Image (cartoon, helix red, strand yellow):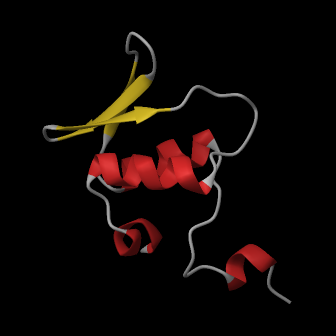
Amino acid sequence: MLPRRKLLSNRLIPVSRRNLIKRLKELGFVGPYTGPDHAFMVRGITRVRIPNPHKKEIGLDLLLEILREGGISRDEWLSN
């Protein structure tokens, strides 16, 4: 039996900071770089803030805000 998260692969799920950075790199972003308030990653002229680690997963609301900020569609985020 597949883990529940695998079954919901067509839906956004909370993500760890580490996995957020890994996925953004797969999508062509470079970094993270240190900023005055938050780290950030860059793809072309697009800059995306990376939340500070608080040993919690990044929730859906914040993930959607990051995707919007980076011009990343839901389909692009979920693609392999």
Q: Quadrant of residue 74?
A: bottom left
In this rendering, the answer to whether 31 lies above or below 75 is above
Residue furthest to the top in view is 36
Q: Is residue 33 left or right of residue 60?
A: left
Q: Quadrant of residue 43?
A: top left
In this rendering, the answer to whether 74 lies above or below 14 is below
Q: Position of residue 4 (x, y in %)?
A: 79, 78
Residue at 33%, 53% in the rendered image: 68
Q: Is residue 61 left or right of residue 44?
A: right
Residue furthest to the bottom in view is 1
Residue at 53%, 31% in the rendered image: 51
Q: Quadrant of residue 29?
A: top left
Q: Position of residue 11 (x, y in %)?
A: 57, 76
Q: Is residue 80 visible?
A: no
Q: Position of residue 3 (x, y in %)?
A: 81, 78
Return the residue nearer the eye: 46 or 31: 46
Residue furthest to the front in view is 61
Q: Is residue 48 visible?
A: yes
Residue furthest to the right in view is 1
